Image (spheres, grey):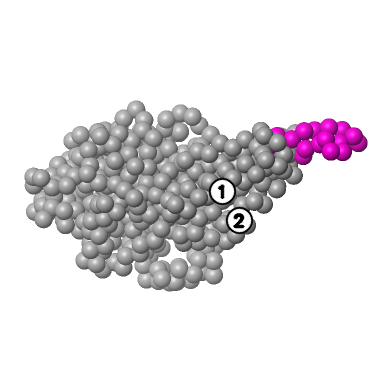
């Protein structure tokens, strides 16, 4: 049987970069290129209902061989990050890695240094797949796709393993936050699912941020500076004042773990009009809500001080912490922890400081934690995949499926 990394090598050369400036679904046509390859592969191993829909969602079912067992979904995304080139990916295999700096590209002098990525030391003796320094690798998330298909193939080849139906989905446009947009949860028909889209071996994630955006307009009054006394209202300065009302230390550069933040990530202004775009993040729902109240109060204070209508605020929720939807079915996490113990992987449970498609799917009625792929340094030229850890991801998922078939 083909190992997961061999499949990965085939998928990695298909350019599936998504594009956040595109309005089309999927955002780039080339995602269909991989989708079609995957449908053919799934069909060739016996997934008869494998298909891709008009929105580029690949779905298929591995029929169960026992009745009345939970239907488990396995999900990965087709696209790669718009942050870096995904064209002409040339994966490079390093066998029995020696633990030293890795020259990705001699000509261009691109080196992955142990001093920059100290965890490279942990990979001594393993087989790594790297880039040639000019593209990303696409381990995020083609490693997940390769692992899922390997799991399916393994289950088909080992029919003595008792299991319920397994549902497979490969989704487009995850990297631009649209992966769950057209996901038909009812059609998928799983009781719960896993995204295979994590990084380091052992990672299981089922907590992510609650997220909102705050879009603020500050209206000023412009007037010739020579005659501006007690008349000019400079919206730039008022915007700066507004920002000072937010806690200085609750920003990304001073927070980690479960600490939330306000991020001012766009600020453009003239005397007349200033626009400020914030994102607000917190794992804890109460703290999240109080952050939203705080920014509302800050805007209110400015309006009290400078007159009604000076500040306009639009608060929009983006996504919520999936924990709320996972805890009632926490067995879906416990089963992964147990599976890891069986295959000799140490579980690492940590909160995601971001969101996942799984978070949105969880709120659409499909509880979906995230499992590691064995890759790291995603979204850039240092993206790397560990072949042995891919195998461990496959073993972990097989064990989870076994545990629900008993
Ligand atoms: Zn991903």
Q: Is residue 140 left or right of residue 60?
A: right
Residue 294 image label: 1
Tell whether position 231 is magenta. Answer: yes
265 or 75, which lies in front?
265
Q: Is mark 1 within 8 Å of ligand 1?
A: no
What secondary structure characterizes most of the magenta part?
loop
| Mark 2 → mark 1, Cα distance in angstroms | 9 Å
| Residue identifier under label 2 | 247
Q: Secondary structure at mark 2?
A: loop
Q: Is mark 2 within 8 Å of ligand 1?
A: no
Residue 255 visible:
yes
Please give the name of the residue rendered at 36% of the width and 56% of the height, measured from the top-left corner. Answer: 205
Dot 2: within a 10 Å radius of its alpha carbon, few (fewer than 14), some, or many (20 or more) residues?
few
The residues colored magenta run 218-234
Residue positioned most to the right: 226
Q: Percent x, y for residue 95? A: 38, 65
Asked whether disc 2 touches disc 1, contact meaning CB atoms under 8 Å apart, the reply is yes
Query: Where is residue 11, by image quadrant?
Result: top left
Please give the name of the residue rendered at 26% of the width and 62% of the height, measured from the top-left corner. Answer: 337
388 or 55, which lies in front?
55
In this picture, is 68 found above or below 342? above
Circle nearer the N terminus (2, 1): 2
236 or 394, which lies in front?
236
Q: Percent x, y for residue 178? A: 43, 38
In this picture, is 327 found above or below 297? below
């Amino acid at each position: 049987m083909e190992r997961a990394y061999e499949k990965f090598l085939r998928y990695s050369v298909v350019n599936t970069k998504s594009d956040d400036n595109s309005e089309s679904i999927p955002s780039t046509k080339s995602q269909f290129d991989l989708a079609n390859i995957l449908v053919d592969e799934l069909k060739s191993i016996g997934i008869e209902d494998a298909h891709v829909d008009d929105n580029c969602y690949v779905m298929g079912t591995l029929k169960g061989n026992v009745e009345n067992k939970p239907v488990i979904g396995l999900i990965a995304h087709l696209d790669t990050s718009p942050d870096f080139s995904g064209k002409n990916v040339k994966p490079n295999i390093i066998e029995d890695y020696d633990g030293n700096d890795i020259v990705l590209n001699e000509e261009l002098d691109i080196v992955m240094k142990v001093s920059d990525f100290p965890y490279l030391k942990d990979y001594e003796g393993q087989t790594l797949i790297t880039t040639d320094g000019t593209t990303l690798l696409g381990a995020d998330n083609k490693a997940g796709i390769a692992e899922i298909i390997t799991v399916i193939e393994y289950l088909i080849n080992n029919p003595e393993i008792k299991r319920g139906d397994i549902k497979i989905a490969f989704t487009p446009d995850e990297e631009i936050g649209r992966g769950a947009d057209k996901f038909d949860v009812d059609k998928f028909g799983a009781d719960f699912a896993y995204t295979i889209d994590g990084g380091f071996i052992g990672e299981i994630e089922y907590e992510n941020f609650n997220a909102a955006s705050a879009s603020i307009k500050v209206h000023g009054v412009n007037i010739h500076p020579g005659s501006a006394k007690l008349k000019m209202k400079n919206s730039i300065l008022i915007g700066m004042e507004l920002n000072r009302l937010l806690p200085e230390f609750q920003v990304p550069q001073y927070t980690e773990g479960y600490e939330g933040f306000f991020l001012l990530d766009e600020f453009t202004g003239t005397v007349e009009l200033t626009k400020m775009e914030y994102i607000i993040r917190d794992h804890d729902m109460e703290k999240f809500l109080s952050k939203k109240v705080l920014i509302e109060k800050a805007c209110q204070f400015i309006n009290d001080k400078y007159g009604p209508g000076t500040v306009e605020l639009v608060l929009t929720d983006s996504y919520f912490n999936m924990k709320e939807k996972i805890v009632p079915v926490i067995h879906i996490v416990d089963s992964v922890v147990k599976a890891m113990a069986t295959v000799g992987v140490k579980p690492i449970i940590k909160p995601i400081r971001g969101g996942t498609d799984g978070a949105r799917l969880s709120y659409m009625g499909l509880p979906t934690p995230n499992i590691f792929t064995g890759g790291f340094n995603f979204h850039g030229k240092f993206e790397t995949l560990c072949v042995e850890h891919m195998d461990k991801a496959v073993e972990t998922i097989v064990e989870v499926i076994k545990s629900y078939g008993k």
